Amino acid sequence: MKKKKLFSRDNQAYLYLLPWIVGMLVLQIYPFITSFYYSLTEYNALTDPKFVGMANYIRLFTRDKEFFKSLTATVTYAVLTVPFKIIMSLFIAILLNKGRKGIGALRTIYYLPSLFGGSMAVSILWKIMFMDDGMINAFLHSFGHETISFLGNPATALPTLSALEVWQFGSSMVMFLAALKQVPQSLYEAARIDGAGRIKSFFSITIPQISPIIFFCIIMQTINALQNFTSAFVVTQGGPVKSTYMLGLKLYNDGFLFMKMGYASATSWIIFGLVTIFTLVLFGTSKFWVFYGDE
């Protein structure tokens, strides 16, 4: 009589998935649900949470003057950052989609900023570069230009932070580069026979063919932009006059400086709602400009 195996093949599959399942439940699902509960409470992490219902959300929208400044700064930052980052990524990918000598090393060099761009060290370097006596102003002085207060002027502080994010275009560039290599060359040959130039071929062939990747990159970059914290915290600390006071930075200050964990949790759910709205809008409009292989 054959002994019954302790683990069948199906059970073995679940056993292999167990570390991921536990990690998802403990590190993602549980904090996700708990943060919503805390957003309905008055909680300072030192005492037991006191249920207050929607009071935190009502206060955010009616009495917190900083909230709308943070909301405006966050949305403006995303609107400035995402289009330029996508355009830059696609432009560089097109330039690197050539079979030239040393192109592999060049692609690696262009990808490097994405490996280091989100770190504290590079944010500090960016701050030093754009200070009134920094390298950028020193370069402008060599041409007789006056000092520009990139980080001290509300009109230039947010674009300066956006430039840091745009500089980290490597991940999107790699995806665009892979997508460009999958576009059938026969389509370009047929377009040339029909008399189409490069610009028309780009908008009629290249963009539709890689539109799913463009769609994916826009969603991911939008999510990243709406959750920005590092650059606002390190480079400007939310200034000047709250022009770069992102929701992520407000969440941090409320939760860890003022110990208002429940209030900070409400802000985090506002960010989640903002991300959801942008994502739904993108998915709703995708049917007009995203084309898949079977269409």
Image: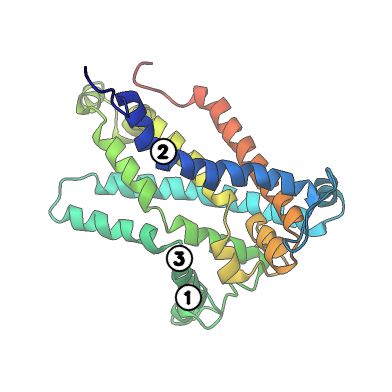
Q: Quadrant of residue 151?
A: bottom right
Give me the residue at 79% from left, 50% from top: 41
Q: Secondary structure at mark 2?
A: helix
Q: Nearer the viewer, residue 27 or 231?
A: 27
Q: Quadrant of the N terminus?
A: top left
Amino acid type indicated by mark 3: Ser
Amino acid type indicated by mark 2: Leu
Q: Residues within 10 Å of mark 2 (few under 14, many from 20)?
A: few
Q: Which label number is shown at residue 153?
A: none
From the image, state whether disc 1 or disc 2 is nearer to you: 2
**Residue 7 appears left or right of 255:** left
Q: Nearer the viewer, residue 128 or 148?
A: 128
Residue beneath disc 2: 18
Cα distance in 3D space between marks 1 and 2: 47 Å
Q: Secondary structure at mark 3?
A: loop
State the image coordinates of residue 280 (x, y, percent, origin top left): 60, 31
Q: Residues within 10 Å of mark 1 (few under 14, many from 20)?
A: some
State the image coordinates of residue 155 (x, y, percent, origin top left): 65, 64
Residue beneath disc 3: 119
Task: Tell me, yes or no, if residue 209 can be seen here.
Answer: no
Amino acid type indicated by mark 1: Met
Residue beneath disc 1: 129
Please, which colouring scheme is shown? rainbow
